Image (spheres, helix red, strand yellow):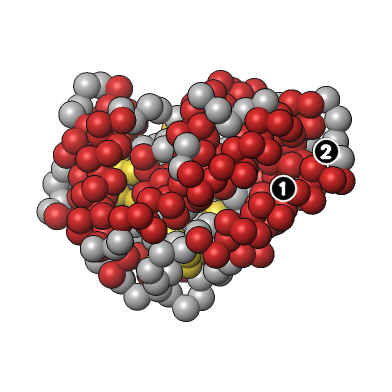
Amino acid sequence: MTGGDKGWMTSRGIKMREELLISFLAENNLESAAREPLAGDASSRRYERIITNDESLILMDAPPPQDVRGFVTIARALRGFGYSAPEITAEQAEQGFLLLEDLGDDVFARLFEAGEPEGPLYQLAVDFLVELAKSPVPPFLPAFSDDYVREQNEMFLEYYVPEKIGKPLDAEPRAFYLEIWENLLPRMRVGPDVMLLRDFHSENLIYLKDREGLRALGLLDFQDALSGPMAYDLVSLLQDARRDVAEPMADEMFYRYLDATGVEEAAFRESYAILGVHRALRIMGIFIRLAKVEGKRKYLDMIPRMQKHLVGNLAHPGLAALRNWLDLTVGEGRS
């Protein structure tokens, strides 16, 4: 949470925010609509369902310095490709308010908890990724570059490592860690870069049973989309921080993607493992930060699952040096 975000969390800030929100709703003739709070995410964005006699909409409330324009731009690009991102029905970007099409409550994670068979929904998600890889990459997307990976790797060093060893990491092991990653970066990419939605997992995917084909997949939380390695979103889907995907299911979906795209297996599997390690370490660092800095301790419960994903990815022989470093430095990385 940034300093700007914290400003909205004072009692005066909350009151001012509510006044701005009511004004935004009034501008869209929704001042008398019912408002139903919805579960949020790891950010400081808030969501409400806005209900009238005729329709329901979703309000996104993202206080500055958050910027909703990225969400708007990417939503329109995805809809332009024919995919089911929510339609933007009204926006006030300067204040961080959006009104979105309501895609419903059939989030994959909720359906799985209710006993819905996993196979067809995971197949739908993988088939979407296959088609997305064929779509042109919007030129405005930032790159999942080597510098981006270096920057994101700092989250693990800054938050997770000190939590594990009780002090900041010394310069020598830190330099060795960075050197290991310099050797991994060239092997991180296979094939052309594609559009990455990045948070492509069971709580951000909605089943739209009344729509046909890939349009049956509703998309959420894609405002941080990038242009980058094709394996990344598949890792996000199959190495979910929030739920376990059984190994046979993960293997089946991995090969479904591989067969449909025609990429070479050995290189793709190494890319998948490297990206899986990068993502696991980054998320573990983020979860420690959320708990310690923002008091969101529920995310600590998800760390063991990410540690399990980490171990699985580190079993790839191309990651032996990193596996040894993690074992010696934080006592993790081996089964």
The residue that label 1 is drawn on is 177
Asked whether residue 38 appears in the rendered view, the answer is: no
* Kind of residue sitting beneath label 1: Tyr
Q: Nearer the viewer, residue 234 or 44?
A: 234
* Kind of residue sitting beneath label 2: Leu
Identified at 79% across, 46% down, the residue is 174
Identified at 65% across, 30% down, the residue is 327
As helix, strand or loop, the secondary structure at mark 2 comes to loop
Identified at 31% across, 30% down, the residue is 247
Residue 118 lies left or right of residue 16; in this view the side is: left
Q: Position of residue 29 (x, y in %)?
A: 43, 54
Q: Position of residue 305 (x, y in %)?
A: 49, 26
Q: Which mark is residue 301?
A: none
**Rendered position, 122 above or below 36:** below
Q: Residues within 10 Å of mark 2 (few under 14, many from 20)?
A: some
Asked whether residue 110 appears in the rendered view, the answer is: yes
Residue 79 lies left or right of residue 67; in this view the side is: left
Q: Nearer the viewer, residue 50 or 227?
A: 227
Identified at 79% across, 32% down, the residue is 162
Q: Position of residue 274 (x, y in %)?
A: 51, 50
The residue that label 2 is drawn on is 169
Contact check, label 1 and label 2, Cβ < 8 Å: yes
Image quarter hosting the N terminus = top right
